[in-house]
Image: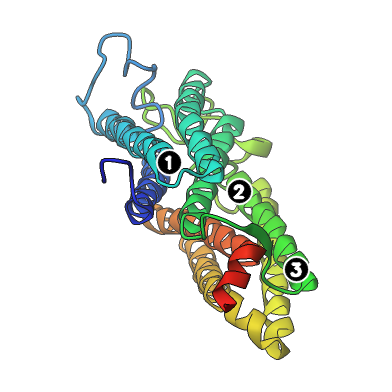
């Protein structure tokens, strides 16, 4: 950091750190759920009525570690906001994105508290995850835009019909992710009551549509099919986008990297998704699938912003030609 502020390169490095932390907390939070540790601490901000911090058993320790890691995320996001303010030159768009993240992380803590207070209500668990996806999107956006020129107007980098296709792909990616959260909150990993040491029965956490622990339960089967259909529609849109690029050399070069990353992630996600269901939803594969969903959201944000660019002011373009 220079005496007059952060350089664009330093700011970009801080953006990378914030994105990594936000991505890790998604998976660590998922592991709390997958290991049945959602109520390892049955209070908030204290772990329980007796202790602020309690690692007397495995479930409490897992929940406690996730809470402590949240503080690291807060530090990373706060540093990103501070760097956005002291970046030279200062840019309004980067400040706005950093404020979104600065507000979003504490909001996540509040939602996490409500999840505990409502005994792992599936709707609140879903909100908890989707808010994380919003924060990942904001972090990716800030990272990408930190590399843009500091002056100029944002214009389209591809032909309008391709930009519309990318927007459609992003919408359906969102639908597929939301459907995935509904699927998770209908199946066996919807949570459990730690004090009872059970995953099913009247003492277990509630599930959407009266879902059971059995992966062949009626509710989970049809919810999984809806999720799968949304995924297939999304992938079809992606391949239609790829087909449209075959005769547009410039646009293909612009979208090649993010679209390739998106397609690879989506294919891996599909393989993991079908494999985990056939294997009875083992925790390890479900965690990988969760990480893949986070990666896919990041790739979608990358693809979204690749369709635009910052054009230098006309005066600067004229000067460059002289």
As drawn, the residue found furthest toward the top would be 50
How many discs mark residues in the rendered view? 3
Residue that appears at 38% across and 19% down: 42
Question: In the image, what residue occupies the spot 39% across and 50% down?
Answer: 15
The foreground one among 129 and 314 is 314
Name which of mark 2 and mark 1 comes first in the sequence. Answer: 1
Disc 2 crowd, CA 10 A, few/some/many (<14, 14-19, 20+): many
Dot 1 crowding, Cα within 10 Å, few <14, some 14–19, many 20+: many
Of 7 and 297, nearer the camera is: 7
Which quadrant of the figure has residue 32?
A: top left
Question: Which residue is label 1 attached to?
Answer: 84
Which circle marks residue 165 in the picture?
3
In the image, is 109 to the left or to the right of 170? left
Near mark 3 (Cα within 10 A), the count class, few <14, some 14-19 or many ≥20, is: some
- Vertically, is 23 above or below 126? below
Q: Considering only vertical position in the picture, is 292 above or below 183?
A: below
Q: CA distance from mark 3 to mark 1?
A: 32 Å
Q: Which mark is residue 183?
A: 2
Residue 57 vertical position relative to residue 140 in the rendered view, above or below: above
**Whether residue 272 is visible:** yes
| Badge 2 vs badge 1, beta-carbon distance below 8 Å | no
């Amino acid at each position: 950091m220079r005496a007059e502020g952060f350089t664009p390169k330093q700011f970009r490095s801080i953006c990378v750190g914030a994105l990594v932390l936000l991505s890790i907390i998604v998976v660590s939070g998922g592991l709390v759920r997958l290991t049945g540790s959602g109520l390892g601490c049955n209070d908030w901000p204290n772990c329980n009525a007796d202790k602020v911090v309690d690692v007397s058993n495995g479930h409490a320790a897992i929940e406690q570690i996730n809470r402590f890691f949240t503080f690291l995320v807060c530090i990373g996001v706060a540093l990103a906001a501070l760097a956005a303010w002291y970046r030279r030159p200062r840019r309004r768009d980067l400040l706005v994105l950093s404020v979104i993240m600065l507000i979003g992380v504490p909001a996540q803590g509040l939602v996490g508290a409500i999840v505990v207070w409502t005994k792992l209500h599936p709707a609140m668990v879903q909100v908890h995850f989707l808010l994380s996806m919003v924060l990942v999107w904001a972090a990716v956006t800030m990272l990408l835009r930190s590399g843009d020129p500091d002056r100029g107007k944002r214009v389209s980098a591809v032909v309008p019909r391709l930009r519309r296709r990318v927007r459609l792909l992003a919408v359906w990616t969102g639908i597929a992710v939301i459907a995935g959260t509904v699927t998770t909150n209908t199946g066996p990993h919807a949570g459990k009551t730690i004090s009872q040491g059970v995953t099913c029965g009247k003492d277990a956490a509630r599930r959407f549509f009266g879902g059971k622990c059995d992966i062949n339960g009626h509710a989970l089967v049809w919810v999984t099919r809806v999720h799968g259909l949304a995924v297939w529609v999304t992938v079809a849109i992606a391949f239609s986008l790829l087909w449209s690029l075959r005769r547009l050399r410039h646009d293909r070069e612009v979208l090649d990297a993010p679209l390739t990353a998106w397609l690879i992630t989506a294919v891996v996600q599909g393989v993991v998704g079908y494999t985990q269901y056939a294997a009875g939803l083992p925790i390890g594969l479900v965690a990988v699938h969760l990480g893949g969903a986070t990666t896919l959201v990041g790739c979608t944000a990358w693809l979204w912003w690749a369709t635009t660019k910052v054009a230098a002011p006309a005066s600067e373009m004229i000067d460059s030609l002289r």
